[in-house]
């Protein structure tokens, strides 16, 4: 009965036994939040014990809120067609918004408290809350007076609209082209079906239609982006005093500027590894040289199917080989029935692992269809679950990993699985398809995003310095030529491609986080390969820290110096190994 659709839906009773219990607790939350308000009058005469009492109460309130939202969210993700679930989820979210409004006074007071007093209170609060409390205050040097902050908040209600305007404009676009004799009119979100099509003519037609449109719209979208860059610089550099536009984002990620520079520098050197890969990909496609049109062409898809039981067994073995506790923790998710496995109408697409509160077995959503990539997704999500469970000892404020470390256990889990598959699968075509899939993924998350970040740095500089849009297009084209070298031909009109990247508009300088997360894991995995079992406790300590320490310091303590480009280059060595392995498989195949 492994593939019985009903039998693999999650059990929410660990959160609340039923809807009635959920409703009762939701009412209790509102009352407790109101009661918390009494602290407002007492803040300035808090002693040690009072402060601790406040923190514990705040923690309890947050725990309850997280459980409530988890229940409503998970119920909704399992069946978005249920009106009752939809209403409960919306209501839970609005209650959460009200809760933060009611408790905001604490945060504001805490951020503005004088240093000596804050220091004494952090000491009194103890290790458990120390990083969270200090981290909130670390924004102090970049925080302005109350009037100025109010003005910025008001400014942002307008400035934040830029991302929305961008989306609205993009949603209106349709791209018309011919594909295999048929006339296609696709929305932006549907284009990747065609840019990743088997047929090269279809890929090219889709890209041409897309780039033609963005070229026509370059004036309006480009000027909109100039506003994004101006606004970012005004707020973060001119008003808040960050040295450069990207350093504001680095601060949000809790990463020193030097780390991000080291990462970007290493990817520049590492680009050559991908150039070797793209030459191999050209060979597999029977082309002399790859064109940018062919970058995402599918190669060697395999038909091998796995049942869910087989998938669980594979991930189990892969995790166990690394560490028995890793396996025990992933098994916990399956045994607690905290997993919803198969696709069905009304269920949310994609996959996630959701750890509502510290110590609770996380909930995993999949849309398992039995392909090798679905097995990899299972390993990825269960990696997230293991991460949550290892970090169970922290308060709800710091048990989630910070963004730079958020994908470490998941990607590591995926690497373990892929290695296992490459070891155990006897079909060379399947092994090749796994390697192609991996390497395409590495390119997309590492190199492409790192060069996006380089482009953003330059584009912000150009635009706020009054440069014409042509200079920005040229800068983008240069980042393409730099990353591909002579391995991939880049037609000129790809210079307009940057205009279709939403992140540039709604979250400036976000994209390098993808490269950071993925390459970090590859570099760590490289260490695992060389150090063997000695590496295991190091990774487990990093994961068990959750979000309770500064990421760079945490890694440093375990002997990983992320300010050193050499550390990042070791990740590229691993990619190089995959490329070499792929080449060997291809040679064998063509013999
Ligand atoms: Zn993930």
Image (spheres, rainbow, N blue to C red):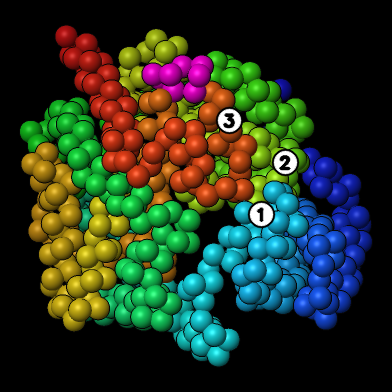
Q: Is residue 364 above or below residue 247?
A: above
- Is there CB contact under 8 Å for labels 2 and 3? no
Q: Is residue 534 magenta?
A: yes
The residue wearing badge 2 is 393
Q: Secondary structure at mark 1?
A: helix
Which numbered mark, 2 or 1, is in the foreground of this view?
Answer: 1
Q: Position of residue 462 (x, y in %)?
A: 19, 73
Q: Nearer the viewer, residue 286 or 160?
A: 160
Give how far apart the Cα atoms at labels 3 and 1 are: 21 Å
Asked if the residues shown at circle 2 and circle 1 are in contact, with their CB atoms under 8 angstroms apart, the answer is no
| Residue on which disc 3 sits | 540
Using the rendered image of the protein, determine whether residue 226 is visible from the camera's viewpoint.
yes
Query: In the rendered view, does 159 fall on the left or right side of 184?
Result: right
Work out whether mark 3 precedes mark 1 in sequence or the reverse, and give the earlier one: 1
Label 2: element kind = loop
Which image quadrant is residue 91 in? bottom right
Q: Quadrant of residue 427?
A: top left
Residue 429 sits in quarter: top left
Disc 1 packing (10 Å; few <14; some 14–19; many ≥20): some
* Residue count near mark 3 (Cα–Cα under 10 Å), binned few <14, some 14–19, many ≥20: some
Residue at the spot of label 1: 130
Residue at image x 24%, y 47%? Answer: 265
**Closer mark to the observer between disc 3 and disc 1:** 1
Q: Earlier in the sequence, mark 2 or mark 3?
A: 2
Position of residue 575 relative to residue 68, above or below, is above
Residue 391 position, x and y percent, is 66, 40
* Label 2 – label 1 distance at C-alpha: 14 Å
The residue lying at 18 percent from left, 69 percent from top is: 472
**Which residues fall within the magenta stretch?**
528-535
Taking the image as shown, residue 461 lies to the left or right of residue 244, namely left
Q: Main secondary structure of the magenta part?
A: helix
Is 392 a magenta residue? Answer: no
């Amino acid at each position: 009965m492994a593939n019985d659709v009903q039998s693999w839906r999650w059990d929410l009773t660990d959160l609340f036994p039923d809807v009635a219990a959920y409703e009762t607790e939701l009412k209790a939350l509102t009352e407790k939040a109101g009661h918390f308000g009494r602290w407002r009058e007492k803040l300035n005469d808090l002693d040690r014990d009072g402060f601790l009492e406040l923190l514990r109460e705040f923690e309890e309130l947050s725990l309850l809120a997280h459980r409530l939202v988890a229940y409503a969210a998970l119920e909704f993700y399992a069946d978005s067609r249920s009106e009752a679930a939809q209403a409960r989820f919306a209501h839970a979210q609005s209650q959460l918004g009200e809760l933060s409004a009611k408790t905001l006074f604490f945060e504001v007071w805490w951020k503005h408290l004088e240093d000596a007093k804050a220091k004494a209170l952090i000491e009194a609060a103890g290790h458990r809350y120390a990083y969270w409390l200090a981290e909130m205050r670390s924004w102090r040097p970049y925080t302005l007076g109350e009037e100025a902050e109010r003005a910025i908040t008001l400014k942002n209600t307008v400035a934040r609209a830029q991302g929305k305007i961008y989306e609205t404009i993009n949603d209106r676009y349709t791209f018309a082209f011919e594909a295999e004799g048929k006339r296609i009119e696709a929305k932006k979100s549907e284009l990747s079906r065609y840019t990743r099509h088997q047929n090269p003519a279809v890929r090219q037609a889709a890209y041409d239609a897309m780039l033609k449109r963005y070229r026509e719209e370059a004036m309006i979208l480009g000027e909109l982006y100039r506003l994004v860059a101006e606004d970012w610089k005004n707020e973060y550099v001119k008003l808040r005093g960050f040295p450069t536009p990207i350093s504001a984002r680095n601060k949000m990620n809790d990463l020193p500027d030097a780390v991000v520079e080291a990462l970007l520098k290493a990817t520049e050197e590492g680009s050559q590894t991908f150039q070797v890969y793209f030459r191999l990909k050209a060979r597999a496609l029977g082309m002399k040289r790859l064109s940018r049109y062919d970058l995402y062409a599918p190669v060697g898809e395999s038909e091998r199917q796995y049942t869910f039981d087989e998938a669980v067994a594979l991930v189990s073995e892969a995790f166990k080989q690394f560490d028995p506790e890793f396996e025990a923790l992933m098994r916990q998710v399956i045994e607690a029935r905290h997993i919803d496995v198969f696709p069905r109408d009304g269920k949310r697409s994609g996959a996630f692992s959701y750890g509502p509160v510290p110590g609770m077995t996380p909930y995993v959503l999949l849309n398992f269809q039995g392909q090798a990539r679905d097995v990899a997704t299972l390993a990825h999500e269960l990696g997230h679950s293991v991460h949550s469970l290892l970090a169970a000892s922290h308060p709800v404020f710091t048990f989630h990993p910070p963004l730079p470390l958020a994908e470490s256990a998941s990607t590591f889990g995926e690497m373990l699985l892929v290695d296992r598959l490459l070891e155990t699968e006897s079909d060379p075509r399947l092994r090749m398809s796994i390697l192609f899939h991996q390497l395409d993924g590495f390119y997309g998350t590492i190199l492409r995003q790192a060069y996006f970040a380089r482009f953003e740095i330059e584009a912000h500089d150009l635009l706020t310095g009054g440069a014409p849009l042509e200079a920005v297009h040229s800068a983008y084209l240069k980042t393409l030529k730099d990353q591909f070298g002579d391995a991939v031909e880049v037609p000129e009109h790809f210079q307009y491609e940057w205009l279709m990247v939403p992140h540039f508009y709604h979250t400036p300088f976000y994209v390098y986080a993808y490269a950071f997360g993925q390459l970090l894991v590859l570099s760590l995995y490289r260490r695992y390969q060389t150090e063997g079992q000695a590496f295991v406790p190091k990774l487990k300590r990093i994961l068990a820290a959750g979000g309770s320490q500064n990421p760079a310091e945490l890694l440093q303590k375990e002997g990983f110096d992320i300010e050193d480009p050499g550390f990042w280059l070791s990740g590229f060595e691993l990619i190089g190994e995959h490329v070499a392995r792929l080449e060997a498989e291809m040679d064998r195949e063509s013999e």
